[in-house]
Image: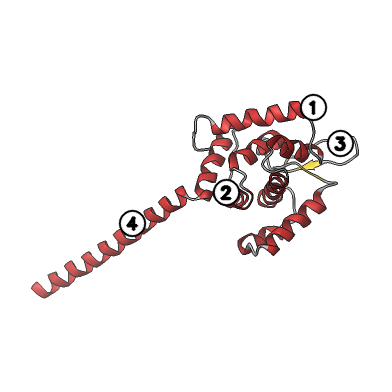
Amino acid sequence: MYFTKSIITYVTMMILTIYLTISLGNKIEQFIYSISKAGKAEFFLEKALVIFKQKWSKENKKAVSQILALSWKRFNLHPTKILAVWGHESGFKFTVVSKPNFDGSYDTGLGQINSNSYYWIYSNAKDFIVKNKIYDMYYILKYKNLKNVRFNALLSAIHLGGLNKQFNNNHIAMLTAYNSGKPRQLYGKYLLYYNKVMKNYFLIVNEDNNV
């Protein structure tokens, strides 16, 4: 009888130990993620989705947060600046397609990537990922569908990051080049575009002093 109770006690303690180990491990993992670039990116993405009243799947949020973190790490472009652009371009409705532009082209998806610019933006993104051996992003390139939020986010984030690097962190040059293909002076429609993006930026950043 005593032996049986000892076995039961031992098994119970083992189960409890395993449970606590797993639970503690998960909490540590969650904490590490929360302070990582991807974790911080997801925090701001969540804020943006609330502001624009959009709901994404958990999987899409996690994947896009990793993409934002990539651009942050490689190009020193903070996620809030990319999110501000996406907010203006599509309102985070990632299947939206624009009306035809004056040249007959159209803009698609989260970052409203232009049909005339798509192939070289895709090629640049692919070259960047292959050159830098960013293996965990390879699968996204296979989608080749601008209405796929991960594919569009990857192309848009790398394009914005590349422009940010090209223009030495000049926010005005980056935004106007993204909008029109080359940097512009802030007047007319370019000033309007810049102001709308910046309005989104301050809404997303809010009072967070770590940006």
User: Residue tagged by mark 1?
Assistant: 189
Q: How is the image coloured?
A: secondary structure
Which quadrant is home to the N terminus?
bottom left
**Residue type at mark 3?**
Asn
Q: Which mark is residue 65?
A: 2
Q: Amino acid at mark 2?
A: Ser
- For the residues labelled 3 and 2, the Cα–Cα distance comes to 30 Å
Counting residues from the start of the chain, the first of labels 4 and 1 encountered is: 4
Q: Earlier in the sequence, mark 1 or mark 2?
A: 2
Query: Seen in the image, is 94 located left or right of residue 73?
Result: right
| First along the sequence among labels 3 and 2 | 2
Q: Secondary structure at mark 2?
A: helix
Mark 4–mark 3 distance (CA, rounded to whole Å): 54 Å
What residue do we see at 76% from left, 28% from top?
186
Residue under circle 3? 101
Front residue of 126 and 210: 210
Q: Which residue is mark 4?
A: 24
Type of amino acid at the residue the image marks with label 4: Leu
What residue occupies the far front of the structure in this picture? Answer: 168
Which residue appears at 79% of the width and 30% of the height?
A: 185
Residue 14 x, y percent position in the rendering = 25, 67
Give whichever of 61, 85 is nearer the camera: 85
Closer to us: mark 1 or mark 2? 1
Query: Whole-Å distance between the Cαs marked 3 and 1?
Result: 15 Å
In terms of depth relative to the viewer, which is nearer, 18 or 186? 186
